[in-house]
């Protein structure tokens, strides 16, 4: 087992995919009596389930081992640190994004870009703990790399010049990252409060409007809120996301060289 301190001293040891146990996918530990055998895929799946249920703050190797019916030391056959396991869990989240065939020249890049953006957003809503980990790791797992490669290939087909393609990717996917992060956090907050999203929103807005220091600002926004449309919080959010993504795609179209389809 490698300690976190040892890992931080080794500049080359920055990812589970580069570590000594990078290939430990089939090694098996003895399970609890009557339980299924342990392997890295099963450990990762259980880690994702625990993170979804309890969040990253409460996640521990000991807690995970208890859920799997093994000792905490058994987990270190497969990973060196808890960070390694979190990185594996993050890559499993990227596996949930359905990726179109970016090599299909007959496909419309706009539809493909929208599909990947929609899947990326949904992943952060389902797993609100994941967004905080994206900037923490190298994201060089197989599913993360497949996601990045697909997004890059789609952006290359937009017709943007090479020097603008990374900016195009940043505009789309940093927007989606921020949108999905806020949405996922809100959904989790509502669930923790035992309220629907509409109930939570109504309660929060009601409390703010009652305060004089906020009332004027929210009164000014009433017209915009009415124009926003939608019967529910989910409807309103969906309208915002769709329109914002359409704006970004229109911007990409506007900046392509003339004559590109």
Image (cartoon, rainbow, N blue to C red):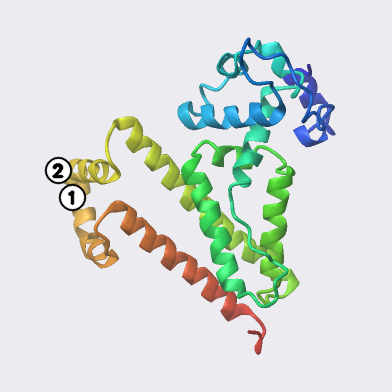
Image x and y of residue 152, in percent? 70, 62
Q: Is residue 129 above or below residue 38?
A: below
Q: Is residue 26 left or right of residue 172?
A: right
All told, the count of numbered labels is 2
Q: Is residue 117 left or right of residue 223?
A: right
Figure quadrant of the N terminus? top right
Q: Residue at x 40, y 37 (%)?
A: 188
Q: Are marks 2 and 1 in contact (CB under 8 Å)?
A: yes
Secondary structure of the residue carrying tag 1 is: helix
Image x and y of residue 194, in percent? 28, 32
Image x and y of residue 252, in percent? 59, 74
Residue assigned mark 1 = 215
Label 2: how many Cα within 10 Å (few below 14, some 14–19, many 20+): few
Quadrant of the image occupied by residue 112: bottom right
Secondary structure of the residue carrying tag 2 is: loop
Marks 2/1: CA–CA distance = 7 Å
Image x and y of residue 236, in percent? 32, 58
Mark linked to residue 210: 2
- Nearer to us in this view, 22 or 178: 22
Mark toward the start of the polypeptide (2 vs 1): 2
Q: Is residue 150 visible?
A: yes
Q: Residue at x 57, y 13 (%)?
A: 66
Label 1: how many Cα within 10 Å (few below 14, some 14–19, many 20+): some
Extreme residue toward the front, this view = 34
């Amino acid at each position: 087992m490698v300690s976190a301190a040892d890992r931080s001293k080794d500049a080359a040891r920055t990812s589970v995919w580069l570590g000594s146990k990078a290939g430990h996918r089939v090694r098996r530990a003895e399970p609890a009596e009557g339980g299924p055998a342990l392997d890295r895929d099963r450990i990762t799946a259980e880690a994702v389930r625990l993170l979804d249920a309890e969040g990253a703050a409460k996640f521990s190797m000991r807690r995970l081992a208890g859920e799997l019916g093994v000792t905490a030391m058994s987990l270190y056959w497969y990973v060196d640190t808890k960070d390694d396991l979190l990185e594996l869990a993050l890559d499993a989240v990227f596996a949930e994004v359905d990726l179109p065939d970016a090599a299909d020249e007959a496909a419309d890049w706009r539809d493909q870009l929208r599909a990947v953006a929609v899947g990326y957003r949904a992943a952060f809503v389902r797993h609100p703990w994941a967004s905080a980990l994206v900037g923490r790791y190298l994201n060089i797992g197989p599913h993360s790399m497949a996601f990045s490669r697909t997004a890059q290939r789609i952006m290359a087909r937009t017709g943007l010049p090479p020097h603008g393609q990374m900016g195009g990717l940043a505009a789309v996917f940093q927007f989606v990252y921020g949108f999905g992060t806020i949405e996922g956090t809100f959904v989790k907050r509502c669930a923790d409060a035992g309220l629907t999203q509409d109930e939570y929103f109504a309660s929060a807005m009601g409390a703010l409007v009652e305060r004089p220091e906020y009332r004027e600002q929210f009164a000014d926004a009433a017209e915009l809120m009415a124009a926003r449309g939608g019967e529910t919080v989910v409807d309103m959010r969906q309208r915002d996301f769709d329109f914002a993504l359409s704006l970004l795609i229109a911007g990409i179209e506007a900046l392509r060289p003339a004559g590109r389809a």
